[in-house]
Amino acid sequence: MKLTRFRAILSARNREFVRDRSALSWNFLFPVLIVIGFAFAFSGESINLYKVGIIGGISSDTGGDIKKALTKEHPFFQTKHITFIPLNNLEAAIIKIEKHQLDMLFDIKSRHYWLNRESPSGYILERVLFGTANNGPDHEMSLSLPFTKQEVSGKQIRYIDWLVPGILAMNIMFSALFGVGYVIVRYRKNGVLKRLKATPLSAFEFLSAQVVSRLWLVMLITVAVYIGTDLVLNLPMYGSYFNLLLVFMMGSISMISIGMLIAARTTSEEFAGGILNLISWPMMFLSGVWFSLEGIHPLLQQLALVFPLTHLINAARAIMLDGAGLLDIAPQLLTLGLMSTVLLVIGAISFRWE
Amino acid sequence: MKYGRVYMTFIIEAQNLIKHFNHVAAVDGVNFALKAGVCFGLLGPNGAGKTTTIEMLEGLIPPTEGNIYFHGKKRGNDFKEHAGIMFQSTALQEFITVKETLQLFTHLYPKPADIDSLIDKCALSEFLHRDTTKLSGGQRQRLLLAIALINNPTIIFLDEPTTGLDPQSRRNFWELVHDIKAQNKTIILTTHYMEEAYELCDEIAIMDHGKIITRGSPEELLAQHFKSVVLQLPADEIDIDTSQLPFTLIRNAKHMEFECTDVNSALQLLLQHNIDLTNLRIRSHTLDDLFLKLTGHQLRT
């Protein structure tokens, strides 16, 4: 391996990436837009879980505050985490109950309520209605329970705090898979690789430069997006930044290795694009970027362990949200390291210039 | 010791080169040996095996059978350091400038040429800081030639270097190739243009169906295959039955061409038939004619 050749290819690839403004801005904007979108969507003080329609019963002097207007009607209407929606047309509202668009419906004047027998939310709301019948919603329940209440006072994690490590990891995945896989296939197709093959450059030197170039660019972007997101959302960080960086780096290497393996022999950009999508989409949905894998089918949980993204996200969340140390995330780091080594070796051995 | 005695005078020698793709012979027994400093042209219709032959010589694809010797020895790993290659179609990395491209390739070779003199030689200074994707056809070919020369090669492969260029750019490119020849470098060139082969090549080989069908200097080949000259007249000025004339006739859409060895008696004969000779043109046979005669193909089809 000649360092001058490696450096020449590395610097040319870095220049290409930095000057390709559209690709560069997409790499930065994509995660930022997703994080901002979700932060905005879940920005309320609390999350309302149920929707209850109200027909009549709202007087003008309450200024449209429906909970205030219903103070005297029943303690149920003061329950937290329920959205009360004023409605005029009873028939239309009943159809909404039928279609699960509303969980419960009250007609204040006629003193009726409706719910859908099929709706779990309706069932729960009715239980709440009964429960609040003799108690104010904010008061301690005065019934004598055979259990004593204990409150958890630990750290509060917002959904967005839980989501950010997943979004960062997903961005690493897309950037590494397409930035290495797709680009090498394009080089092969348009003859860039053929031109390089005619020089003393070795495949190892070429591939190392591609890996290193993408690795530091992906890390740079991830750090920048993390800092930007932290400034806006004040992310929780219970672990070490060094460990987080290490996890993101190992994750990036494993994703780049997948990209390299796909690009090792493929000559068609369309085929490479198809394969990359075939890999990235299941990985995005089964690795727990958007929702927790708790409760999904055990087989799918096992399948998710095949994806490096799962290990990357698990380790990143463990560090950020649970303060996991290096020993705690060692299994994930080892798995990522092993996956990368195997993929890189197969990719490098099977690589063809043409 | 065989090499030292017999081959050392040749810079490159191809011995019985055969290349099969899926059991089809693209190159079927090509032999030649070149002395240092010659410009050798490989001509042939599309699919004749020119590019496959040149790519085997470049070391890009291995021959199915046969041997290639460089300075009398089998090519080693260092052949790439001595060979300059200009491909028929190749893309350069995007988003880097002409100068950065040259610097990139400079760093890939152990003993690169001086970039400034290459820039000067290939007239690249005007667009040195332009993105490689924003070059005209002629500028691009000059850059690709500069890259082919960047390792100061002793042997240079040019695969259809002027295809798609306008006549002016083509002539400019020829000037550059003349300069390279003047430095006693060996050039192996494939081309579709007979005029280009005639202008640049000391020696040509015409290929068809994977074989070399004839070989020699352009002048030798023309002298060997043609003893006649060609008389050309507009077709609509001849209203006699041409089968009465004792010439070999070639007719195309606009012109009628007669091959003859004795111009004086041919002209007298045409006058006797009251044919107007005002628009008569007399030309020598060209490599195009030779090509057509040998392969039955028009070269550019």
Image (spheres, coloured by chain):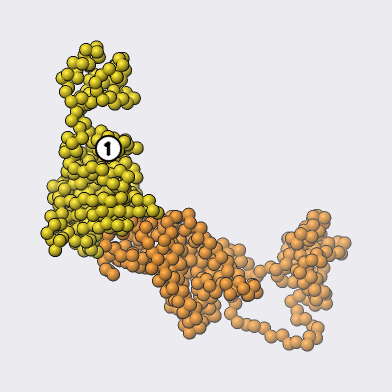
Chain colours: A orange, B yellow
Residue in the picture at 24% in, 23% down: B247
**Location of residue A137 by image quarter:** bottom right
Classify B301 as above or below B104: above
Classify A182 as above or below A248: above
Image x and y of residue B238, in percent: 29, 16
State the residue lying farthest toward the right.
A110
Identify the residue under disc 1.
B294
Residue in the picture at 43% in, 68% down: A257
Image x and y of residue A11, in percent: 32, 62
Residue in the picture at 21% in, 12% down: B272
> Split into 4 quadrants, where in the image is the C terminus of chain A?
bottom left
Residue A59 at least partly seen: no
> Split into 4 quadrants, where in the image is the N terminus of chain A?
bottom left
Decide which of A266, A29 is in the foreground and name it: A266
Residue B218 at least partly seen: yes
Image x and y of residue B134, in percent: 33, 47
Amino acid of disc 1: Leu
What subunit carries mark 1? Answer: B
Decide which of B283, A205 is in the foreground and name it: B283
| Horizontal relation, residue A232 to residue A44: left or right | left
**Location of residue A61 by image quarter:** bottom right
- Would you call the spot at circle 1 few (<14 residues within 10 Å), some (14-19), or many (20 or more)? some
Image x and y of residue B275, in percent: 25, 14
